[in-house]
Amino acid sequence: MEEERVVISTPVEHFPGGADCPTNDVEYLDVELPADALGKDLVDAACLNGGEAATTAACSLGPARWHLPTLAGVNEVVDWTAPADYNFQVTSLCGERAFLGTFDITVSADTVTSVESLDGRSPDLTEDDAMTVQDMLQEANARLRGGGTVRLSLDEQGNPRYIAIGDNLAQSDGASCYFIHKLSAPSS
């Protein structure tokens, strides 16, 4: 547990001979975290500088895997001004819709101009089904006005980093959650 993040390391036993990682069995791991973990990023230690996977495709979005939201919701959604053109990578995990998975999205004039699935979960997602950061914030504002719960975290520059919409994030049909890995605008 660190001041700004929770670092998770899961050692894996190496077997001699060839190995095909994509076909390895999935092993679930339960981790109990204390209350002071809330509001912090959950980070993969193997993707940190000097980590054994830091230069691999699995770490291309950085070491943060998720943001652990605070229990309390917000009373208002940040008034974020989007750049005219920007690119971002986002993981959408909650809800029942096409926009689920990790994506690289390019936005121009408040419109998605390209979307690429980074995890293969929704490879055929179209620009019409993808969301801009403004779309996510509008969804949060609408839910907040309707009496719902919204959790929001910003990065050091004031850009949205995590947006969770809904009283119960485990209730798949009534929740949305977005973790924005990277957001960049072209320099002028």
Image (spheres, grey):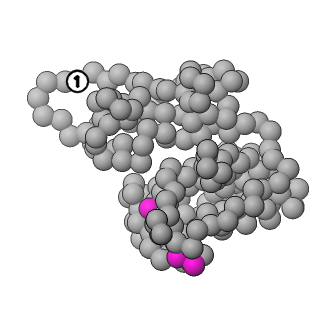
Q: Position of residue 181 (x, y in %)?
A: 50, 50
**Which element is circle 1 on?**
loop
Residue 178 in view here = yes
Residue 105 in view here = no
Residue, disc 1: 14
Q: Residue furthest front?
A: 188
Q: Is residue 15 left or right of residue 96?
A: left
> Depth check: 101 or 172 in front?
101
- Magenta highlight: main SS: strand
Q: How many numbered badges does the structure rendering display? A: 1
Q: Position of residue 58 (x, y in %)?
A: 34, 44
Quadrant in which the N terminus appears = top right
> Depth check: 95 or 150 in front?
150
Q: Residue at x 75, y 61 (%)?
A: 79
Q: Residue at x 55, y 41 (%)?
A: 66
Q: Is residue 133 left or right of residue 53?
A: right
> From what the image shows, is residue 170 above or below residue 187?
above
Q: Residue at x 11, y 29 (%)?
A: 17
Which quarter of the picture shows residue 84? bottom right
Category of crowding for the residue at label 1, using alpha-carbon neighbours closer than 10 angstroms: few (below 14), some (14–19), many (at least 20): few
> From what the image shows, is residue 185 above or below residue 19?
below
> From what the image shows, is residue 72 above or below residue 112?
above
Q: Position of residue 69 (x, y in %)?
A: 68, 39
In the image, which residues are magenta? 104-109
Which quarter of the picture shows residue 40? top right
Which quarter of the picture shows residue 3? top right
Q: Is residue 109 left or right of residue 117?
A: right
Q: Residue furthest left?
A: 17
Q: Is residue 63 left or right of residue 30?
A: left
The kind of residue on which mark 1 rests is His
Asked if the magenta segment contains residue 135, the reply would be no
Q: Residue at x 42, y 24 (%)?
A: 9
